[in-house]
Image: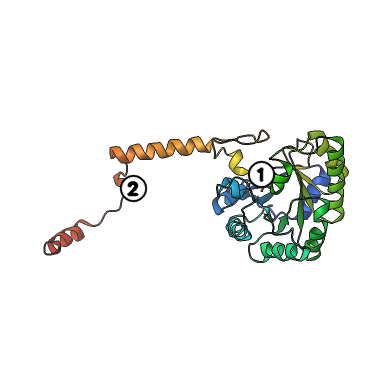
Amino acid sequence: MSTSSSSPQRRKVTTRTLLDKKQRGEVITMLTAYDYPTALAVDQAGIDSILVGDSLGMVVLGYENTLPVTMADMLHHCRAVARGAKYALLVGDLPFMSYQVSAEQAMRNAGRFLQEAGMDAVKLEGGRERLDAIRAIVAAGIPVQGHLGLTPQSVHQLGGFRSQGRTATAARRLLEDALMLQDARCFSIVIESVPTRLAALVSQRLEIPTIGIGAGAGCDGQVLVTHDLLGLFDRFTPRFVKKYADLHGEIARALDTYQTEVRTGTFPRPEHTVDMPDEEWEAFLENVEGIG
Ligand code: KIV
C-alpha cells in the first residue's frame, strides 16, 4: 500500500495506531524534524511519527550537547513542524530542566507543547526517577513517551555519549525501568544505544511499543536524527547511523557552482530576470535626463 500523502486512506497517526502496529507486528517508523520543509518531507514520505527532538540543539543550533536547549527553542521549532506535518504523530521533546524540578513544573511545560505548539505528545528522559513527573503529565491527559539507555541530557553523569545496559546489573535496571514507565502509562519508550539482545528482550516483555536508536532490529520501531540520515554534516556521527544521502556534499557542490557562475557571469541568465515593456523603458529614459 502506498504511504504517500496522496493515499486516500491515510489517517492521522495516534498513540493507538502505534500500539495497534506493535500488536500486528508491524514496524513503526519515526524521524526527527525541526522545521517546516523537513516536517513536510517526512510527513509526505509516510513516516509514522515525527520527533521534534532536543537534538536540534546539536544539529541545528550548533551546541556541543542538548543541555542549553530551552523551552522557547523547543516551542519555536515544534510550531514550525506542526505547520508542515498533517498525519504523523508529533512528539515534542521536553528540554533539560523543564521537567526535573517538580511534577507540577513537568505537567505545565508538557501542556505548553500541546496548547501552544501543536504537538500530540511529549517525550522525556529517564527511568524510575521520573515516575512522578510522568504520572502528573499523563494525569493531565498528555501522552508521554519515555527514553531509556543513552539519555543525552545526562551526558555528564554518564561520562560522555556512551552505550548503556552492558552489564548484567545495568541491563536488569533498564528492564525494571521500562516496566515502571509502562506502569506509569507511557505510550511508548525510546531505547537508545543499548545491546541489541537487551532491547529485543525489553521489547518482548513490554506491551507498549519500543522505538530503538542504536538498539538493533528487535525493537518495535526505529528512530534516527534526520540530519544524520541525510548526511547534512561532514562531522562525527554515531556508528548506529546509516547515511542514506550525502547532502553536505551536495550542498557544497551547489554552492561552489553558484559561486563560479556568479563570478563568470553565467548566472543570472535572462530567464532568471524580470523585464519591462520597451515603451515604458523609452518613457523612463526620456524622463531620466534631469534626475540626479
Ligand atoms: O533528541 C532526539 O532527537 C532524540 C532521539 C535521538 C531519540 O532524543
> Who is closer to the viewer here, 134 or 287?
134
**Residue 203 sits in which quadrant?**
top right
Q: Position of residue 104 (x, y in %)?
A: 76, 66
137 or 19: nearer the viewer: 137
Q: CA distance from mark 2 to mark 1?
A: 37 Å
Identify the residue position indicated by label 2 in the image: 272
* Mark 2 / mark 1, whichever is N-terminal: 1
Crowd band around label 2 with a 10 angstrom C-alpha radius: few (<14), some (14–19), many (20+): few
Q: Is there any visible trace of residue 44 in the rendered image?
A: no
Query: Which residue shows up at 54% across the image and 38% down it?
Result: 233
**Circle nearer the viewer, 2 or 1:** 2
Type of amino acid at the residue the image marks with label 1: Ser
The secondary element bearing badge 2 is classed as: helix
- Report which residue position mark 1 lands on: 2
| Element type where label 1 sits in the image | loop
| Residue 58: percent from left, percent from top | 59, 46
**Label 1 lies in ligand 1 vicinity (Cβ under 8 Å):** no
